[in-house]
Image (tube, coloured by chain):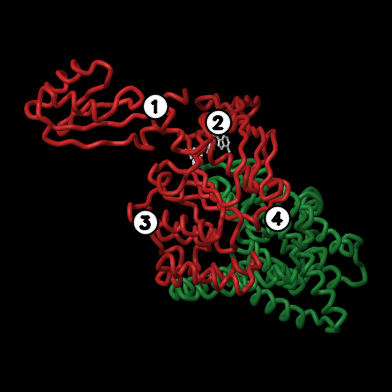
Chain colours: A green, B red
């Protein structure tokens, strides 16, 4: 049997996705309520941001609109993890009850098969909010708009997404070894809230942690420096795409390693 | 007959934490971990030919599911060798998966929210089933069971029996060489059980699919398996035809009779006349266990009739259920 191509996986994903959305839409009340909930969450997030920062013309050299840019950037870059990798939240439960075994019997990549099962549509609302915020702050800051900048934005958005996905994969995969892995996942989830602030506002200890230990600074801060501070880009910003790829790959390996050593509890 | 499964001396050990009791105990567990080894499968060997249906039996905790997990590539044996369709399952998990189908009773592998037909279509893509084969398989299903009402129902809304049926159909869809069924009839009513047995039987005949079946229901065994393999505490007890197994216990048959008078009392008298045989009575029948190697049933009946008239009688073979129970309780002599 030949190796399965990317196209093969893409087609399967599209099929599952289409079916999943169709079946979700058929529960209209459910769909409407979760959509409303999603809008409220985003509006509330935005309002608290606004209350916190509107009174300061700038913080550590970051203007209100630049902060807003960062905020939008983080919202958009968190979309893929929200939409495509949401099943990571249930991994723990599957492993604990032994139901995880059902993912082991298909002739396709285990990680792909597991993640393909859930698509969280609510993430799309966050995406819309994020894009809106980005465009608004882009105008207010008065940034140029050239194809090159657009390319940069896209590359760094992907980078940021990869890092967030990697963090979540790694956190979720801890359940293959420890039982109370929910706290690990929750911790990472909470930390990612800090991703939307410029790292310079934190004290040096946290700065170090957020750069090298739980690298959430790569989610929005380092990438957006490339757009916002084009004259003074630290090396870490340029390295972040590479960092994102490597980190994603490592988290994938870690996840798969856990899944393969999983010894099928339950009968 | 070519062997599709070859297992040589496989053993599987699990390391489990010896948990200490109480709060202080669990605190100690944090620092010094005290493991013990559980040998779930102990040095088992067997071969299975293409097209066989093998009943894989054993009491709870015998190691049946563990063996199946090793054959499907989910678990790596601690030692020994397994070849399934020429693959080492654990090393070539995805390749092996293409060749096999698996059903774990009560754990559906279908997409929970999707109607069965949509699950089938996704499986068709995953297993890259040629359109022709897919269509003819659906037609075959159509002819064997009434799948029409199931096809458009989300799996989530199905009853346990419908779901199990769907899972079995899904497992056979890509025409695998082997299908592993781990307790497929658990929790099902008699009519669904019989439907599922008929289905498995027909698919095995039609497609020459090898089936490895674990169950605690001897009805499944009687309906489907000629060969059975019995394990207990991880060790192989028996591997042969089921008829041969019954022979292990001598050729016993039970003669049941009804006579006038109090059955309990009469059975005592008959026991006196037939000291070599085991005679017992319940509310309806007096049972005489006849070892056919020693005496003919007809002679025994004749002897009983000498001193009384028999109003009614019937003859019972020893059932698979009884044989298996004996083996679980006493082992193979
Ligand atoms: N993941 C595991 N970790 C530790 N021990 C296990 C694990 N899986 C199974 N065991 C142990 O191995 C033994 C065999 O279990 P297995 O599930 O294979 O039994 P079984 O024959 O399928 O039983 P049943 O008929 O009850 O399903 C049991 O003692 C069980 O406790
Ligand atoms: Mg079992």
Vertical position of residue A214 compared to residue A196: above or below: above
Question: How would you rate the neighbour count of disc 1 (Cα within 10 Å): few for under 14, some for 14-19, many for 20 or more?
Answer: few
Dividing the image into 4 quarters, which one contains the N terminus of chain A? bottom right
Q: Nearer the viewer, residue A120 or B142?
A: B142
Q: Does the residue labelled 4 lie within 8 Å of ligand 1?
A: no
Vertical position of residue A265 compared to residue B307: above or below: below
Whole-angstrom CA distance, mark 4 to mark 2, is 28 Å
Could you tell whether B166 is left or right of A134 in the image?
Answer: left
Q: Which of A148 and A7 is in front in this view?
A: A7
Mark 4 on the same chain as mark 1: yes
Residue assigned mark 4: B95
Q: Which of marks 3 and 1 is in front?
A: 1
Residue assigned mark 3: B192
Whole-angstrom CA distance, mark 4 to mark 1, is 46 Å
Residue B162 in sight: yes
Picture quadrant where residue A222 is located? bottom right
Q: Which of marks 3 and 1 is nearer the N terminus?
A: 3
Give the structural element (helix, strand or loop) at label 3.
helix
Tag shown at residue B236 = 2
Picture quadrant where residue B306 is located? top left
């Amino acid at each position: 049997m030949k190796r399965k191509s990317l196209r093969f996986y893409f087609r399967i994903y599209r099929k599952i996705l289409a079916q999943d959305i169709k079946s979700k839409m058929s529960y209209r009340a459910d769909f409407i309520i979760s959509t409303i909930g999603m809008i409220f969450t985003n509006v509330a997030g935005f309002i608290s941001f606004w209350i916190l920062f509107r009174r300061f013309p700038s913080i550590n050299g970051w203007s209100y609109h630049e902060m807003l840019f960062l905020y939008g950037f983080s919202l958009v870059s968190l979309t893929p993890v929200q939409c495509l990798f949401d099943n990571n939240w249930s991994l723990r439960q599957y492993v604990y009850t032994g139901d995880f075994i059902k993912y082991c019997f298909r002739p396709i990549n285990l990680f792909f098969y597991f993640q393909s099962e859930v698509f969280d549509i609510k993430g799309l609302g966050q995406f819309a909010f994020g894009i809106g915020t980005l465009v608004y702050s882009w105008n207010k800051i008065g940034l140029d708009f050239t194809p090159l900048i657009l390319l940069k934005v896209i590359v760094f958005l992907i980078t940021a997404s990869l890092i967030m996905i990697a963090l979540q994969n790694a956190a979720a995969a801890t359940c293959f070894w420890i039982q109370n892995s929910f706290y690990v996942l929750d911790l990472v989830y909470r930390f990612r809230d800090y991703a939307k602030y410029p790292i310079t506002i934190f004290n040096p200890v946290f700065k170090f942690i957020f750069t090298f230990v739980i690298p959430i600074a790569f989610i929005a801060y380092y990438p957006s420096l490339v757009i916002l501070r084009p004259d003074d880009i630290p090396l870490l910003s340029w390295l972040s795409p590479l960092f994102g790829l490597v980190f994603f790959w490592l988290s994938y390996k870690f996840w798969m390693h856990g899944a393969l050593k999983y010894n099928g509890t339950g009968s | 007959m070519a062997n599709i499964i070859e297992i040589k001396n496989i053993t599987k050990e699990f390391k489990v934490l010896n948990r200490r009791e109480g709060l202080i105990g669990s605190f100690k567990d944090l620092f010094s971990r005290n493991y013990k080894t559980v040998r779930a499968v102990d040095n088992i060997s067997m071969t299975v030919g293409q097209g066989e249906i093998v009943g894989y039996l054993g009491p709870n905790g015998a190691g049946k599911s563990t063996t199946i997990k090793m054959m499907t590539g989910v678990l790596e044996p601690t030692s020994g060798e397994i070849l399934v369709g020429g693959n080492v399952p654990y090393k070539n998990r995805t390749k092996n998966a293409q060749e096999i189908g698996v059903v774990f009773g009560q754990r559906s592998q279908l997409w929970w929210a999707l109607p069965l037909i949509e699950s089938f279509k996704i499986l068709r893509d995953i297993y890259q089933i040629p359109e022709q084969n897919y269509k003819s398989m659906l037609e075959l299903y159509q002819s064997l069971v009434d799948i029409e009402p199931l096809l458009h129902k989300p799996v989530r809304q199905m009853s346990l029996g419908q779901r199990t049926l769907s899972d079995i159909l899904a497992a056979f869809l890509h025409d695998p060489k082997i299908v592993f069924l781990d307790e497929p009839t658990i929790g099902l009513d008699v009519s669904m059980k019989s439907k599922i047995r008929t289905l498995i039987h027909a698919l095995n005949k039609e497609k020459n699919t090898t089936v490895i079946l674990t169950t605690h229901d001897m009805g499944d065994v009687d309906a489907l398996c000629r060969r059975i393999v019995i394990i207990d505490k991880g060790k192989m007890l028996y591997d042969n035809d089921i008829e041969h197994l019954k022979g292990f216990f001598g050729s016993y048959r039970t003669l049941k009779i009804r006579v006038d008078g109090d059955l309990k009392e009469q059975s005592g008298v008959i026991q006196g006349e037939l000291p070599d045989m085991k005679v017992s009575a319940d509310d309806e029948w007096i049972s005489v266990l006849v070892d056919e190697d020693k005496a003919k049933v007809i002679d025994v009946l004749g002897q009983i009739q000498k001193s009384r008239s028999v109003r009614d009688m019937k003859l019972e073979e020893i059932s698979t259920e009884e044989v298996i129970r004996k083996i679980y309780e006493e082992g193979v002599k």
